[in-house]
Amino acid sequence: MEKDVVTPGTETQEASQDCAQAVSQEDCAPDVATAVFPDQPQDVQSQDVQPDDQAAIRPDVRQDIPWGLPPEFPIDPFAGDFTGQCGGRFTSEGRKWTFACVTFGCKVNQYETQAIREAWTAAGGWEVDNPAQAELILVNSCAITGKAERDARNALVRLRREACWAVLVLTGCAARLVAGFVPRKDAQKPEADCIVVQEEKQALCDPLVIEDLVHRIYRPEGAESSPSSASAPSAAQQVPAAHWKDLRDRAYPDLRITTYRRVRPVLKVQDGCSHRCTYCIVPSTRGPHVSRDPAAVLAEADRLLEQHAELMISGVNLGQYGRDNPSCGSFWTLLDRLEDALGLKYAGRRRLRISSLEPSQLTEEGCRILSRSQLVAPHLHISLQHASRAVLRRMGRGHYTAETLTEALYRLKDAWPDMGLGADILVGFPGETWEDIDILCRFIENTPFTYAHVFPYSRRPGTPAASFSDQIPRREKAERAARVRSVVAQKARAFWKRRVQDEPDLFLAADAGEGHILKGYIHAVDACYTPCFIPCEELEAAQERVEGAGHSEFVRARPVQTCSHGVVVELVPTR
């Protein structure tokens, strides 16, 4: 099972759009655990393996029992040929191998982990819940903040201790940074058996590379690699440093998915960013923008909408879609193609959401396409960052103003009289004044925001803003964030009350499991992204009547009252 690890809101900041939404979008509720293995039972104590005992439990030595296989493993691991429910083939040792995925960061990372998961499963892997029980472990890292990078390093140290026999594969935005990390004296160095830098991540789906990784599981220490590894890409080796400009001519990474672990799948359409905000390291870790072929986007969207009620269109910077390849058109052209191809098939039964947009992207063309869409939900999440022009310029985001958003909302008001409007906001940026905070708070009060994610700025080594002289003390940044959050909370509560008073029925898609936010309730969202809470027993009863209710099919609900987290609803019985 994938362990999605998020960075606490008080430590995180927005990068080039989606990469900062590890804590800011629908998949991460306020109470999401920040431990590396959040789902691990608290009463289970991990056992440190002493060096003298390692040989006794290494898979390449311990051949007498099917080590690491979960209780539900569907086969006798030493029987003959078999193709089971998890697909794939046996290894040369005659049994399947186990793997686990540990994912940090944004929705783009979550998508890429899913692509690797599917490739490993098709090659014969069996995913286990607990990484400490896996023979091959993927660590998909994030570098949006210094803390995110530390989280990846700490995960490697912990995994090396708890699964000393496993082959550790490190990839993601922090892979190169972690590889070059020098720990303080006497501290344990985070080490991986295989380092795959971000621009090579797709190699982890290559059958030859997977075969080499699996061979490492069974190969005794000191043995040579498998013959196939010589012709495989460089995924099983450490890749030398590269400047982001060296990646300008790269192709879009060949990663794709057929299903998704979560209720709302991510559809990745773009990678990289060429707009270098002064606080953001993403252009250095993911390289310049690159766009996915529209035909591949349409095919994958159709596959995912067959199985899920909602779909999230995502990328590192959606505004740069198509700039590297004019044949792709713009992002709005892509959205129009999705509408033309899938609108009649899914209108009223499925919803599209856009992960994040800058105010400058909400052009007349964009607003026109949104207004006529039958698929896009009336909900926008805006990478605003601030409302003060002075602060935006220092952030390197002087290409729009807060008023740019106001103008766009005016264009949308007829088509979307009721809409959800969220934002990412970064406070405490170097040089920011309390007057700037006043400007920001007034703008929030006068704009129909329904929620916002407010982050105190944190220094990111390797970015220009980290060396700005007028840094703000941590305590004062926290005070400013608290003030802005109080204004946002008032706007959210007012919106929830209006939903209870004005909306007779809501059509909901479940967003998380039982007790994710409120005990005894399932978290769900309506078209406007209102946080709604369905009593568990009601949703279970609905699922007995309608297969996929709340997941692949919307459920109809009536708002009852507001609560501290949103709107409590009751399901409307179906005839």
Image (cartoon, grey):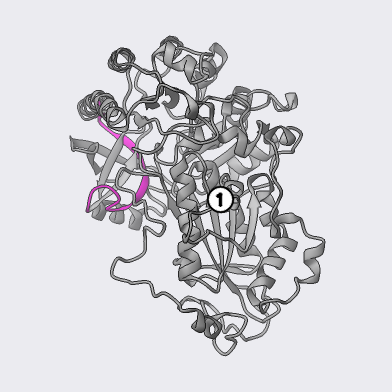
Residue 345 falls inside the magenta stretch: no
Rendering coords of residue 384 (x, y %): 43, 22
Residue 259 in view in this figure:
no
Count how many numbered circles sit on residues in the image.
1
Q: Is residue 248 left or right of residue 346?
A: right
| Residue at the disc numbered 1 | 181
Residue 168 in the image: x percent, y percent?
Answer: 57, 63
Q: Residue at x 34, y 21 (%)?
A: 418
User: At numbered mark 1, what does the secondary structure look like: helix, strand or loop?
Assistant: loop
Q: Is residue 553 left or right of residue 254?
A: left
Q: Amino acid at mark 1?
A: Phe
Tell me: 342 left or right of 386: right
The stretch in magenta equals 502-519
> Which is nearer the eye, 540 or 29?
29
Identified at 27% across, 16% down, the residue is 445
Left/right of residue 350 with respect to residue 544 in the rendered view: right
Say which quarter of the image contains residue 221.
Answer: bottom right
Q: Position of residue 113 (x, y in %)?
A: 56, 52
- The structure residue drawn at horizontal position 54% and vertical position 87%, both measured from the top left corner, is 65
Image point (56%, 50%), residue name: 181
